[in-house]
Amino acid sequence: MRFIPALLLTGAMLLSGAGSAGAQEVVESLRGGAPITETSRLDAMFRPEKDQDLIPRNFQKQPPLIPHSIKGYNITQNFNKCMDCHSRERAEETGATKVAKSHYLDREDKKLSNISPRRYFCMQCHVPQFDAKPLVENTYKPAAKKGE
Ligand code: HEC
Ligand code: HEC
């Protein structure tokens, strides 16, 4: 009868007035209590940062964060604005980092002449840098590099 201690505990907490808030810290989402239809807070949340220095990557295979504004950089069926600067062909001229070689491979690791459909929607993996406070504490530390 394992559930009994839990029931007793809940009862005791209610009696002592501890309630759920005291027992467990509630994490408030970025939107807070605002209803999803209320956009004013969203505007503040998604305030794009100005172009800035790169935030260093935390581990080798991390998709790098985007260090520039992406306002108006649309991706449609026929045109990918990101690739307009980041493709192999355009990178030298635009000064953008070439997309990684992995972005030209299909799932069998076969080389493609154009961006792989698996990598077409850049924002699936790359997000702009934000000065956002973490909602919960994060104690992640990258593993030591080889030889360190
Ligand atoms: C007008 C040209 C241009 C467009 C369009 C553009 N970028 Fe960039 N991007 C750059 C340049 C230039 C840099 C290098 C900035 C630097 O090194 O400080 C860069 C850097 C980056 C980086 C960081 C790479 C690294 O070395 O860590 C990422 C990720 C990135 N862009 C993603 C994107 C995505 C996703 C889009 C589309 C939503 C996009 N970019 C559209 C010019 C562009
Ligand atoms: C499925 C996830 C995913 C998608 C989609 C994706 N990337 Fe990446 N990207 C990564 C990862 C992971 C890395 C770093 C590891 C690597 O090199 O593959 C990376 C690396 C990069 C780099 C840095 C390359 C370097 O040499 O340091 C650039 C620039 C970049 N991506 C741009 C883009 C652009 C532009 C698009 C859209 C056309 C895109 N990525 C789509 C996951 C993704």
Image (cartoon, helix red, strand yellow):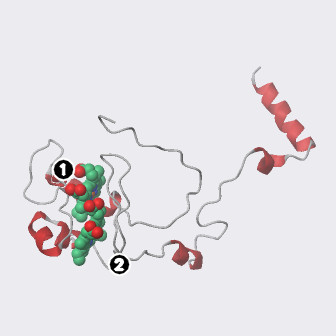
**Can you say whether 23 is above or below 87 in the image?**
above
Q: Looking at the rendering, which quadrant does residue 32 occupy?
A: bottom right
Task: Identify residue type, mark 1.
Answer: Ser
**Which corner quadrant of the image does residue 125 belong to?**
bottom left
Q: Is residue 25 left or right of residue 82?
A: right
- Can you say which quadrant of the picture contains the C terminus? top left
Q: Relative to residue 28, is residue 9 depicted above or below?
A: above
Residue where numbered disc 1 is placed: 102
Residue 126 location in percent, x, y?
Answer: 34, 60
Q: Nearer the viewer, residue 2 or 42?
A: 42
Respond yes or no on whether mark 1 lies under 8 Å from ligand 2: yes
Toward the front, the furthest residue is: 148
Which residue occupies 58% across, 74% down? 37
* Picture disc at residue 71: 2
Q: Residue at x 48, y 73 (%)?
A: 46
* Residue 105 on image: x %, y %: 15, 49
